[in-house]
Amino acid sequence: MASPASAASPASIPDALGAWAVETPGPIATGPLVRIRRRTPVPGPGDLLLHVEACGVCRTDLHLAEGDLNPHRPSTVPGHEIVGRVIATGEGVTRFRTGDRAGGAWLRGTCGTCRYCLAGRENLCPWSLYTGWDADGGFADLTLVPEAFAYPLPESQDPVLLAPLLCAGIIGYRALRRSALPEGGRLGLYGFGGSAHLAAQVALAEGATVHVLTRSARARRLALDLGAASAGDAYDRPPEPLDSAILFAPVGDLVPVALEALDRSGTLAVAGIHLTDIPVLNYERHLFQERNLRSVTSNTRHDGREFLELAERIGIQVTTSPYPLSRADRALADLAGGRVQGAAVLVPD
């Protein structure tokens, strides 16, 4: 068992950390993300203090910065695709030791006792907590992660390539399962950023035919390079009816477009935490013939473990655009402007 607040050397832990925080949410052009310095937190019971090696930039971070998501606390540090080294542990930590590599993800706490938790559906826990929303995240030099919600990560892999797996990958995987894709089925992906390009590879490895619909010409080229059967504009009709579809773009206007592309009994899963308003649906055109519309809410730790094992087994290819931590504001702006290829990832300067 690791000792309370153990560390390789107390002198190696700085008194203060550098980070970015959302001060006043608003359009990205108004500069909602600002640089700050804070006292280094002391790990409490069950906590890991991580030195951040890489942190992915998720669209949820953008939603928080721009105010699409209501802040849960003032001056929150975003970032929930965290790869780091354990430099100190709190009392009761048993799964990690100082020097281990660990991953911090979006889901960081649940009650463990409600009917959802007890049924294996902890993603629906009414008292769930989230990294970079309810507690400071990984847009920082150092951060705390609860051991119970941390993932052990392979030592041999590049942390930049591991970071997007911890949310983009896990959420994309849950969305794929929510889409009820049949064996050998036809899958449409609307939007093709950090999450979609990972989900596509899982679907392809499982024998699906994948059609990508996205506004970005660069993303369409990436989709074809990864093995997609076709790649068109977001509002195009795919070349064949779809058994399943996943909407990754936070654009409500695409919901009826994707529903119309489904074959009979097809399922559309909406993967984002935020979506612009959905237009009025026509029952006969969009839902009749047992088409299904589903949402995706967070993930369970089981989803995370299952996806990370699968990603390693199939050798998933992660396309990233690295940014130094000092340019986190630029990374968010590029994400907002559709200028990021694959997943943006922050790395120490």
Image (cartoon, rainbow, N blue to C red):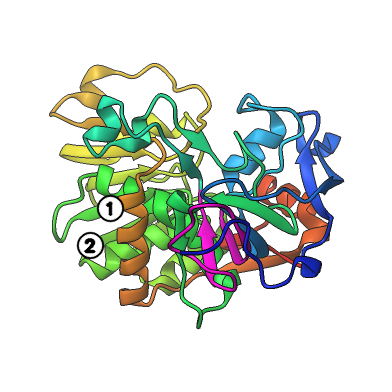
Question: Does the magenta segment cover residue 211?
Answer: no
Disc 2 designates what residue?
A: 208
Instruction: Identify which residue, 39 or 300, lies in the foreground.
Output: 39
Q: Quadrant of the C terminus?
A: bottom right
Circle 2 — which element?
A: loop
Q: Amino acid at mark 1?
A: Leu
Question: Does the magenta segment cover residue 83?
Answer: yes
x, y percent for residue 52: 67, 63
Disc 1 designates what residue?
A: 187
Marks 1,2: beta carbons within 8 A: yes
Instruction: Identify which residue, 286 or 307, lies in the foreground.
Output: 307
- Residue 228 in sight in this render: no
Q: Residue at x 32, y 68 (%)?
A: 309
Dot 2 crowding, Cα within 10 Å, few <14, some 14–19, many 20+: many
Dot 1 crowding, Cα within 10 Å, few <14, some 14–19, many 20+: many
- Residue 123 in sight in this render: yes
The correct choice, above or below, for 235 with respect to 150 in the image is above
Of the image marks 1 and 2, the number of the one nearer the N terminus: 1
x, y percent for residue 314: 32, 75
